[in-house]
């Protein structure tokens, strides 16, 4: 019998297994402490971000069924830091009777963009026009039909803009097919000339209770999320409700448990289309640690443990998060002093990762009453940590 705690009549999962030891697992661990939930980690190595802080760490390969099975046997529920665990392994766990949250039927929509596009389109969810294309010729035909530029994407394995190409003309149609991993498809997508990108975050429990966060505006630079602003400036109350309702509907239709992040592109006429889905805490929700009543990390844990979800309200008129990407400071801790001294109200999270140029190594969040000042403070904090502007 596994240990279980009883709270208000429900028996939540007390030991939560997280597959993947990145910064999301590290921040999930932080959120677990106050709730008294135990975390077990299946990490890629002994020193990865979350392995530095979690007490019970198994170092192993998440693509190896035996390793994942043995790990899951010690957990009440299994959840994720990333979406790369092969779907077959997740199905095997479910067949073993393991509570996998989100389950493989849901998670495949965050793993495979073809599955996601087909299913969302069949539900009538607004998406860019798309087609799976076998070669440069088919991609060119798609571009000629829908217009250039064309966005091409790998169906699986992309992150931080890797595996996404903007192709301006037929001459570039061969690019996505060079060195393509076997079993990975290329999707051609209509280029959306968006005015901005938004993120709609919801948390959902197994029984169906869900809560929606305020909508966030996200800024991508070279394919990497660099800043977020919450609430998204200028979004009308109707548009806010529509984005939230869309995310809740997707969570329900796909039976997502945990956090669902719906990445949206907003066209100049205000309409939105879905870019992609993530079923784990998301970079665009990091502001919630300091800026929301309940963080996305805590609500993910509550959801997968089947506990009542927490309020998503903002704690301040504006929350601005700026990612810290690896820069010229090899030692982030050395840069902490001037950052903290410059702005005692700034909230800083460092992930314990080695500094590599362009790698996400931390983030800062500023809360405030005035958008311009709050944005400036967040960006200045991130810049100082990156080694910019401290001459
Ligand atoms: N159809 C499109 N039209 C215009 N721009 C797009 C389109 N699809 C994607 N993009 C741009 O490319 C970025 C990355 O695309 P996507 O989110 O699919 O890639 P990813 O690498 O899997 O994601 P992530 O960076 O979130 O891990 C988007 O945030 C958006 O800026
Ligand atoms: Mg994306």
Image (cartoon, grey):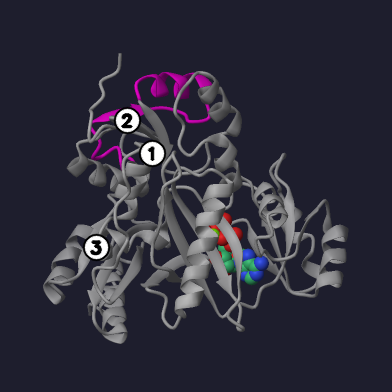
Quadrant for ligand 1 reads bottom right
Q: Which of marks 3 and 1 is in front?
A: 1
Which residue appears at 31% of the width and 40% of the height? Answer: 307
Query: Which residue is identified by label 1?
Result: 304
Q: Which mark is residue 13?
A: 2
Disc 3 or 1, which lies upstream in sequence? Answer: 3
Distance of mark 2 from mark 3, alpha carbons?
A: 26 Å
Looking at the rendered structure, the secondary structure element under dot 3 is helix
* Residue 248: % across, % down: 50, 56
Q: In this view, does 303 lie above or below 145?
A: above
State the residue in front, 286 or 364: 286
Pointer 2 with pointer 3, Cβ within 8 A: no
Which residue is at a point 67% across and 57% down the rendered structure image?
153
Q: Is residue 139 on the magenta stretch? A: no
Task: Residue 327: give x, y in percent of width and height.
Answer: 35, 65
Dividing the image into 4 quarters, which one contains the N terminus?
Answer: top left
**Image: magenta residue range:** 48-75
- What residue does disc 3 label? 290
| Numbered circles on residues, count | 3
- Tell me, yes or no, if residue 2 can be seen here: yes
Q: How crowded is mark 3: few (under 14 residues within 10 Å), some or many (20 or more)?
A: many
CA gap, disc 3 to disc 1? 22 Å
Q: Quadrant of residue 306?
A: top left
First-in-chain label (2 vs 1):
2
Q: Do the residues labelled 2 and 1 touch (CB within 8 Å)?
A: yes
Percent across and percent down for residue 279 are 48, 48
**Residue 25 seen anywhere in this rendered image of the structure:** no
| Rendered location of residue 332, percent (x, y) | 24, 60
């Amino acid at each position: 019998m596994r240990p279980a705690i009883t709270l208000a009549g429900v028996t939540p999962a007390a030991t939560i297994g997280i597959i993947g030891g990145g910064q999301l697992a590290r921040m999930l661990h932080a959120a677990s402490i106050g709730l008294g939930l135990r975390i077990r980690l299946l990490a890629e190595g002994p020193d990865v971000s979350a392995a530095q802080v979690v007490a019970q760490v198994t170092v192993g390969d998440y693509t190896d069924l035996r390793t994942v099975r043995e790990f899951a046997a010690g957990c009440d529920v299994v959840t994720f830091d990333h979406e790369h665990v092969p779907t077959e392994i997740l199905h095997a766990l479910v067949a073993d009777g393991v509570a996998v949250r989100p389950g493989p039927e849901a998670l495949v929509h965050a793993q495979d963009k073809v599955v996601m596009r087909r299913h969302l389109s069949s539900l009538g969810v607004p998406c860019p026009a798309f087609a799976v294309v076998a070669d440069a010729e088919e991609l060119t035909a798609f571009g000629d039909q829908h217009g250039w530029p064309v966005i091409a994407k790998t169906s699986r394995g992309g992150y931080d803009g890797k595996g996404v190409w903007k192709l301006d003309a037929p001459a570039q149609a061969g690019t996505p097919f060079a060195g393509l991993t076997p079993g990975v498809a290329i999707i051609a997508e209509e280029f959306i000339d968006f005015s901005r990108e938004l993120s709609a975050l919801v948390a959902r429990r197994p029984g169906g209770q869900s809560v929606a966060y305020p909508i966030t505006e996200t800024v991508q630079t070279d394919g990497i999320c660099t800043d977020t602003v919450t609430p998204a400036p200028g979004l009308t109350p109707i548009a806010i409700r529509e984005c939230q309702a869309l995310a809740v509907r997707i969570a329900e239709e796909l039976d997502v448990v945990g956090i669902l992040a719906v990445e949206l592109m907003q066209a100049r006429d205000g309409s939105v289309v879905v870019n992609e889905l993530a079923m784990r805490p998301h970079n665009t929700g990091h502001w919630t640690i300091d800026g929301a009543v309940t963080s996305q990390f805590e609500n993910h844990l509550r959801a997968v443990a089947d506990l009542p979800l927490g309020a998503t309200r903002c704690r301040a008129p504006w929350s601005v998060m700026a990612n810290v990407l690896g820069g010229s400071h090899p030692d982030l801790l050395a840069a902490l002093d001037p950052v903290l001294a410059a702005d005692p109200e700034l909230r800083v999270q460092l992930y314990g990762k080695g500094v590599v140029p362009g790698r996400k190594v931390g983030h800062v969040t500023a809360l405030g009453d005035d958008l311009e000042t709050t944005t400036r403070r967040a960006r200045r904090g991130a810049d100082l940590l990156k080694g910019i502007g401290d001459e």
